[in-house]
Amino acid sequence: MSWINRRRVRIALLSAVGLVLVLAVGFFSFAPAKIESMRNRVEPADLPSVTADTRRLHDALEIVDMHADTLMWDRDLLDRSGRGHLDLPRLEDGNVALQVFSSVSKSPKGQNYESNPTDAGDNITLLSIAQLQPPRTWGSLLERSLYHAEKLADAAEESEGRLRLVRSVADLDGLLTDRKAGLRVTGALFSVEGLHNLEGEFDNLDRLYDAGMRMAGFTHFFDNEVAGSMHGEDKGGLTDLGRRVFAEMERRGIVVDIAHASHDAVADMLALATKPLVLSHGGVQATCDVNRNLTDAEIRGVAATGGVVGVGYWDAAVCDLTTKAVVDAIDHVVEVGGIETAALGSDFDGATTTGWDTTQLAAITQELVDRGYDAREIGLIMGENTIRVLRAVLPD
């Protein structure tokens, strides 16, 4: 080959490499944001008009949302974003006192509400790589959750006091005291959505606890080593490992979340509970007949533990994208389990479509006012019930 031809080959190779690099930069820069924009959408609902009286009431509430999956996505919690459902500026706009941030570490390919095999391919692996997360997260469910915990801790550290981690009753009480004193501060509690991130090892609970995990759902969309999922193939109860983990969570002060768990697993957890349990996000079958939603017997069971049912805002939780549908579910929880059992669990940023984002939470307050709830009852539903549960479960 002549030197001219060799030079042409080198130029062609360099051009090809350059094109690949340009395409790669374009993909990793824009694809994750595009994916999230497609998955976390707001289809504006016809919201009730918020009166001046309701706005004053809303602004005086201590609001707690028990579930958002924001940590899964590649954006800064401290910056106002044009996509998704929440970030710190929007939490402040909505007057949220405490947001529970969940770690989603696995989502099966072909995910559905009826039946997913445990060994199905995983969507979060591809998302982790596309978002250029640390390579340690690409093949480890545990490392993904630890990375999410680091993201939350880093955001709190960089927030100049506006975002504060809540890991104990003392943290919670300090947060609420400072808010009442007029400080602009929002609490953040770290949870996980499915204990498959233990990777079958009991001792990994130590690492998650040390990283700040203070709430945990046992399952997500598939059966795992600790419990059966409502969306799994076997849908069994707690395993021996699951029973051991349950007892240790209660001992340490980690809130047990029954979301996504099979009916058998929920029954096992209700039977074992010595502290309040929560459904962090979901609905009730009486108003939305979807398998993941609670039966009346399960609502009564949660109420008997002193726990709460966090009603979500997306279609599979309440069968519509309206505040009416949300409060219909809340009404039913109150009717079956009592006013002390109703709570909020949005599932914001959980690859969900909702009728509003967190800046518009006053519309739910208005819907409650319009249904005849008084200020005390609204305060309980919007956050005080969940605060009571956290005081009863979290470590001192």
Image (spheres, helix red, strand yellow):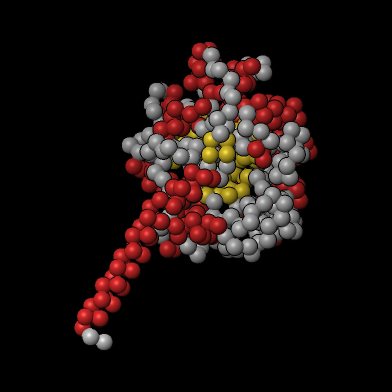
**Which residue is nearer to you in this view: 282 or 204?**
282
**Which residue is nearer to you in this view: 14 or 44?**
14
Query: Where residue 40 appears, x then y in whole percent?
Result: 53, 42
Q: Is residue 338 above or below residue 217?
A: above
Residue at point 33% right, 37% down?
160
Residue at point 51% right, 63% down?
140
What is the count of numbered marks?
Answer: 0
- In what quadrant of the picture does the N terminus appear? bottom left
Residue at point 37% right, 60% down?
23
Query: Where residue 219 appears, x then y in whole percent?
Result: 64, 52
Residue 69 vs residue 108: left or right? left
Residue 250 vs residue 179: left or right? right
Q: Is residue 141 above or below residue 255?
A: below
Would you identify the image quadrant in which residue 381 lies?
A: top right
Q: Residue furthest bottom?
A: 1
Query: Where residue 53 appears, x then y in whole percent?
Result: 53, 12
Residue at point 41% right, 33% down?
89
Q: Is residue 247 visible?
A: no
Q: Is residue 329 visible?
A: yes
Q: Is residue 177 above or below residue 126?
A: above
Residue 187 vs residue 373: left or right? left
Q: Residue furthest right?
A: 297
Query: Where residue 374 appears, x then y in whole percent?
Result: 63, 16
